[in-house]
Structures are given as C-alpha cells and as structure tokens.
Amino acid sequence: AQSVAQPEDQVNVAEGNPLTVKCTYSVSGNPYLFWYVQYPNRGLQFLLKYITGDNLVKGSYGFEAEFNKSQTSFHLKKPSALVSDSALYFCAVSPLNSGYSTLTFGKGTMLLVSP
Amino acid sequence: NAGVTQTPKFQVLKTGQSMTLQCAQDMNHNSMYWYRQDPGMGLRLIYYSASEGTTDKGEVPNGYNVSRLNKREFSLRLESAAPSQTSVYFCASSEAPRAGGAEAFFGQGTRLTVV
C-alpha cells in the first residue's frame, strides 16, 4: 500500500522569505508525485508533478519541488513567499503503472504567509 | 471552458435519505474520480472510472454507488445517508496516457451535511 506523510499541519513564513512544505512517501517501486493547492471553498489545483528525469521540478506560480529518492521525499519550495500563497497544500502519489490518477493524498499543510 | 462541474454545491440530508451527486467534464478525459475530503484526513478515493464503461472501488467505497453515464458524466449516489458521510465531495477527471502520471482536474466540490 502506498502512503504520503506531511509532517507539518501548518507552516508560517513572512512574505519575501523562502518557504518549504515537507512531504515524504512510501510506495513500492518508483512513484508519480504531485503537489496540489486548495484555496478556501475551492477545488484542488495542480501545481507540479514528478514523473522521471530531473529531480528538481518547476511548476506553477514560481513553485518547485525536489525529488529525493534516498530520503523518499518530495518537498515543495518557493524562493520568495507571497501573501497570496496562503492556502492548503497537498502532496499526493500515484502508482507507477497506473494509466490514471488514483491519487493517495497526504493530510495537507496549511501555509500562512504574513505581510 | 468549464472543466469539471459538480452539482449541487451544497446539500443537507436527513439520515436515511438518498441523493445523487452529479459530475460532468468537458475536457474529453477518459478517467473520472470521486473523492471525499474530511478535516485532517486529506482526500480519500471513493470510486473511480478508468474509462467509459468501467468503475472500480477506491479506498472508502462503503455506502456509495457510482454510474459512469457516458464519457462526460460520472455520478455518485448515497442510497441511505448517514452522519458519517458528512463531508466535502470532489469529482475529478484526467487523461489516461499509457505512461501514466496524468494530473487530475478537480471540480469545486459539494458540501454535504447529513443530520
């Protein structure tokens, strides 16, 4: 069975500072990894994904994530946080051989960016 | 381009009542999904349809049924609602490339309360 852990319920950062939202996973073999963002009373929006290749993945809104196979981690990062980045962030994993997106999600991390 | 549309957006049911949540996508995606979101638990897969004509159980299927009406529409039915089914329900769709790893597109959600 696959699983995703987001160890922090909430991350607080000041605007302009770098941010990191942590994610670790457990899966047999190599996974597909995703980050999604949810703004209040909205559905989830795709940010970025890791399939294969370069361990540093760049996505929407200036976010990037680093895949580390030895540490089974896929941390979300941004060099300079904006107040508008405040939202709920989900890490998710999908089976490698699946042609569809039966995602297993982490519990989510609330990111609060203060002015 | 509407993407994934869910109806209704809000619903209150009495215990034992039945209802159907509707979902339609206009992106010509092969795969569709139903997730539920509960506080502190992330999103959990209820049912999915890898392609038109097929449906499969996800992590938490008990108490639910689904119908893939056609390529565009995927409905979720609660036959006899229980308070434990109070949740926010999300429909999603994705392409089905052979290599997998397709990102899912989510609807805005249906907030269901069972009293």
Image: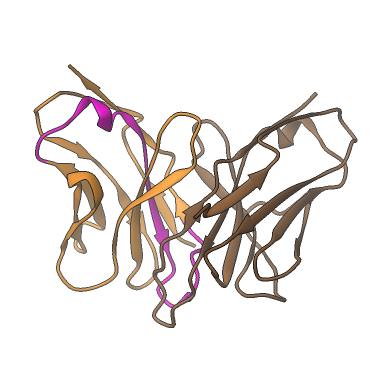
Any idea which chain is the brown one in this picture? B
Query: Residue A28: x percent and y percent?
Result: 39, 70
Q: Extreme right residue here? A: B16
Q: Extreme top residue here? A: A115
Could you say which is closer to the camera, residue B42 or residue B105? B105
Q: Name the residue: 72% across, 76% down.
A: B53
Horizontal side of A32 relative to B97 (left or right) equals left
Q: Is residue A91 magenta?
A: yes
Q: Name the residue: 70% across, 39% down.
A: B8
Horizontal side of B90 relative to B80 (left or right) equals left
Q: Extreme bottom residue here? A: B98
In the rendered picture, chain A carries what hue?
orange
Q: Name the residue: 64% across, 57% down.
A: B24
Q: Name the residue: 69% across, 60% down.
A: B74
Query: Residue B40: x percent and y percent?
Result: 49, 32
Question: Where B39 falls versus A49 (above or below)?
Answer: above
Image: magenta residue range: A79-103
